[in-house]
Amino acid sequence: MKINRIDHICVAVKDLEAAQKAWEPVLGKSGPDETYVDDVARVRVARYMIGETGLELMEDTTGNGDTARFIEKKGEGIMLMGLNVDSARQSLDELKSAGYRLISDPTYGEVLPSALNCEYGFVHPRALNGVLLEIIDYKWEEAK
């Protein structure tokens, strides 16, 4: 599997505004480069671009989503690392063939479509020291 770059790192936080106040001075930013709500993942996100890598602070919007469950079990902290590849489908197939457990979505299977005109999928955190690994083939025009 060829990795182009670390695409993004997600930090699960209880309070997005408080987390932004803590992180922005460290990152040398006066605000996020992008904010959005992902209704499917049930998170509110503040994304900061550091070179070609996004640092995403994620706050659960429902109290019972994956981010809330992560915080309940492990506390706030790094929840996910995303790797950018040319083909998520091919890379996930390679990882599965190598014995890595993938997370399967009940609707789409192991490779999910994105509204960002790309595909992505996840390696189970038990396979990688508790870190949820996302494989994504988004074509970042901003990073070129």
Image: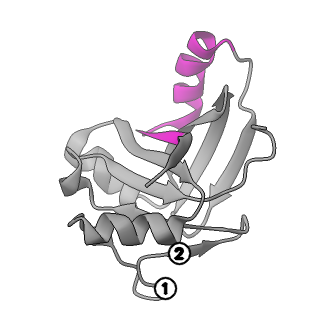
What residue is rendered at 53% in x and 18% in y?
22
22 inside magenta stretch: yes
Residue 134 place in picture, x, y as percent: 44, 55
Q: Which residue is mark 2?
A: 112
The image quadrant that residue 137 belongs to is: bottom right
- 19, above or below 25, in the image: below
| Residue 111 placement (x, y as % from top left) | 48, 75
Residue 137 lies left or right of residue 106; in this view the side is: right
Name the amino acid, label 2. Answer: Leu
Residue located at (59% from left, 32% from top): 17
Q: Amino acid at mark 1?
A: Tyr
Give above or below for 138 relative to 24. below
Residue 68 drawn at (x, y percent) = 36, 53
Q: Which residues are magenta?
A: 8-28
Disc ID at residue 108: 1
Graded by Cα atoms within 10 Å as few (under 14), some (14 to 19) or many (20 or more), the crowding at tag 1 reads few
The extreme bottom residue here reads 107
Q: Are marks 1 and 2 in contact (CB under 8 Å)?
A: yes
Q: Residue at x 40, y 46 (%)?
A: 80
